[in-house]
Amino acid sequence: MRGIITVIGMDKIGIIAGVSTLLAENRVNILDISQTILGEYFTMMMLVDMEKMELSLEEIKEKLNGLGKELGVSIKLQHEDIFRSMHRI
């Protein structure tokens, strides 16, 4: 099972470290990552493998949401299939 994580917010130190640490602690593997700074805004997309995680999708979403609040950014996780369906032309 793969997912897409998006992170958007004001740039600050520790965003990538915080997200990647939470994922590693929960056995979520980062397959690909793209991040950029647009002016003062931080944006990141990650393709992740969730096969080995021991939590449910909803539980990991809650953890990411809590981390986003701590970091002052929006963190969203979508199952890859939902992401593909939403972005089909």
Image: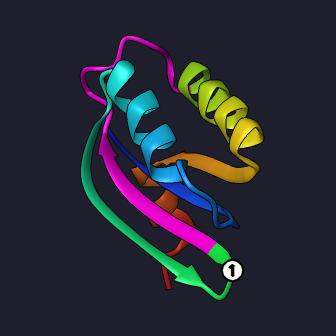
Q: Position of residue 8 (x, y in %)?
A: 65, 64
Residue under the image location 63 percent in, 49 percent down: 75
Considering depth in this image, is 63 or 40 the residue closer to the camera? Answer: 40
Residue indicated by mark 1: 40
- Callout 1: few (<14), some (14-19), or many (20+) C-alpha neighbours within 10 Å? few
Q: Position of residue 73 (x, y in %)?
A: 71, 53
Q: Is 29 on the left or on the right of 83, as rendered?
A: left
Residue under the image location 39 percent in, 57 percent down: 46
Q: Range of the magenta residues?
A: 42-57
Residue under the image location 60 percent in, 34 percent down: 64
User: Residue 33 is drawn in which quadrant?
Assistant: bottom left
Answer above or below: position of 61 versus 2: above
Answer above or below: position of 57 versus 2: above
Assign a secondary structure to mark 1.
loop
Residue under the image location 54 percent in, 25 percent down: 60
Answer above or below: position of 55 versus 62: above
Residue 34 falls within the magenta-colored stretch: no
Q: Position of residue 18 (x, y in %)?
A: 50, 39
Q: Is 76 on the left or on the right of 3, as rendered?
A: right
Considering depth in this image, is 49 or 12 the residue closer to the camera? Answer: 12
User: Residue 21 is drawn in which quadrant?
Assistant: top left
